[in-house]
Each structure stands twice: as structure tokens, then as C-alpha cells.
Amino acid sequence: MSTIASQVKNRIDSFQVGKIIAYSDFEDISNTQAVALFLSRLVKAGTLKRIGKGKYYVPKETKFGSIGPSESAILESIMKETGGYITGPSVYNALGLTTQVANRITVVGNKFPRKAQLGKIRVRYVQAKFPIVKEDVYLLQLLDAIKDIQKIMDTTIDDSIDKIKAKIRKLDENQISKIIDYATKYYRPYVRATLGAIMDEFKNPKASLLKETLTSLTVFKIGFSDKVLPKKKDWNFV
């Protein structure tokens, strides 16, 4: 066995069963072509299985057959590769905004927009328009939920915004400053107005920072009721 093949095999043997293996796991080995060739040979030998383009795993054999990587392992691999975050229906379900179980995930990151299949998971990649800071992902997911408020399935707009309000109410002042900053720089006016109406209802003075980014002539038709968003008229919602 060649030196490169030995290096690759030894590294694979050190990985936990079910881990997603990608070319990046061998980036310190200079001959990438030889690495790719040896991985292909391992697939043909049955030692590895391919789960997607450039992604492999060591199957776990049980009496019920071969078991692939867990969904969490797949998602961890995607996040490592893209430096991004998950958004869309799968996150809205995790946030308790909908009971809909998504069969596709949306990833915002530094990868060019495309669709892919990893195992049973369908992935839609969206190019990030802003730098993603890991500790701020939750704030971005809340803003995305506001952005998609009319598209969230198996719920009502009022119910969704009521749950989002409850989560925003729990943010500390540093998080409030950050979410306002993200909304101001990267999100559309109706998202800023919705966040502003929520902040206004909570009597948070920082709502004025959002108000300054909006024009009095712009009117928003989202469908919030007065009950769930009492300050909506002050923010030009009809």
C-alpha cells in the first residue's frame, strides 16, 4: 500500500462510524487526486459508501443491514463545509412555529446556490449576503421566520408572530442590539417594521432605530391582527 493510501486508510480508521468523510479531512495530504482515487477504491471494495458528491461514510453493519450516518452528522458536515446556518421549514419546526416536518433543509452559507441530495436529505444552498457569526445564528433564524411569516405552513400568521414575539422578549440587550443591526443592514423593510412593532410593544427605546430606516409612505399588507401586533398601525401595517 502506498504512503498516501496508508495515510488515508489510517485516518479513516480513526474516525467514528457514521461520520461524514469529505476531501477536507485530508487537506494536509498534497496529492488530492491520489486521495480521491483511493476513496473511490474503498467505495468499490465496500469499505466506504458514498452519500453525495465528494462525501462518504463508513457503514455500520447490524443484523438489520447497513446503517448510514445520522441526520445530525450530515448537518454537522454541511455546516462545516459552508460555514453557514440552517433556515426554512426545518428550523421553524424546531422553533415551535409549525408542526410541519420538512423533508428538505435550506442552508445559508458561502457555497454557491444549488440543490443537492445527501442521503435522504434534500439540501438547498443559498448564498449568504452577510458575514455569518456562529453565536448570532439564532437571531438570523428569528429574522428569517419574520421574513417568511406568510409562508410558514400548518399555522396562522398571528400564531407564528405571537411565538416569535415570545422568543424576542427573552433576548438580552446585547442580542436586541444585534438583531436590530442585522435587520437594518440586511433585511427588507417589512421585516424591520415587524421587528420595530414588536420592540415598540415591549416599550424598548431601540425601536426608534428601526423607525429611522423606514419611510412614512411605505404601507405593509402582511395580515397581522391588532390583537397580536397592537402597534401595527404605528408601523404602517394595514
Image (cartoon, rainbow, N blue to C red):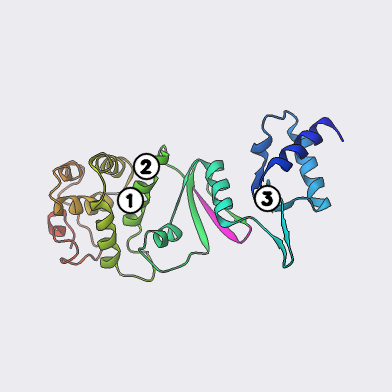
* Magenta span: 119-126
Is residue 197 inside the magenta stretch? no
Amino acid type, mark 2: Asp
- At which x and y percent is residue 157? 29, 66
Of labels 3 and 1, the one closer to you: 3
Q: What is the three-letter code of the residue carrying label 1?
A: Leu
Indicate which disc, 3 or 1, sits on the residue closer to the N terminus: 3
Image point (16%, 56%), residue name? 236
User: Which labelled disc corresponds to residue 136?
Assistant: 2
Name the front one of labels 1 and 2.
Answer: 2
Question: Does residue 111 appear in the picture of this structure?
Answer: no
Q: Which mark is residue 17?
A: 3
Determine the secondary structure under disc 2. helix
The residue closer to the viewer here, 220 or 23, is 23
Q: Is residue 15 above or below residue 68?
A: above
User: How many angstroms separate mark 3 from mark 2 (CA)?
Assistant: 31 Å
Left or right: residue 118 versus residue 234 is right
- Residue shown at 45%/60% (left/top)? 90
Q: Quadrant of the C terminus?
A: bottom left
Answer left or right for 26 relative to 122. right
Give the quarter of the image for residue 119.
bottom right
- The dominant secondary structure in magenta is strand
In front: 135, or 144?
135
Q: Residues within 10 Å of mark 2 (few under 14, many from 20)?
A: some
Mark 1: few, some, or many residues within 10 Å (few <14, many ≥20)?
many
| Number of marks present in the image shown | 3
Query: Which of the two discs, 3 and 2, labels the residue nearer the N terminus?
Result: 3
- Residue that extends furthest to the front in the rendered view of this protein: 63
According to the picture, the residue beneath numbered tag 1 turns out to be 143
Give x and y (percent) for residue 235: 16, 54
User: Please, what secondary structure does the residue beneath circle 3 have?
Assistant: loop
Q: Residue 92 got which mark?
A: none
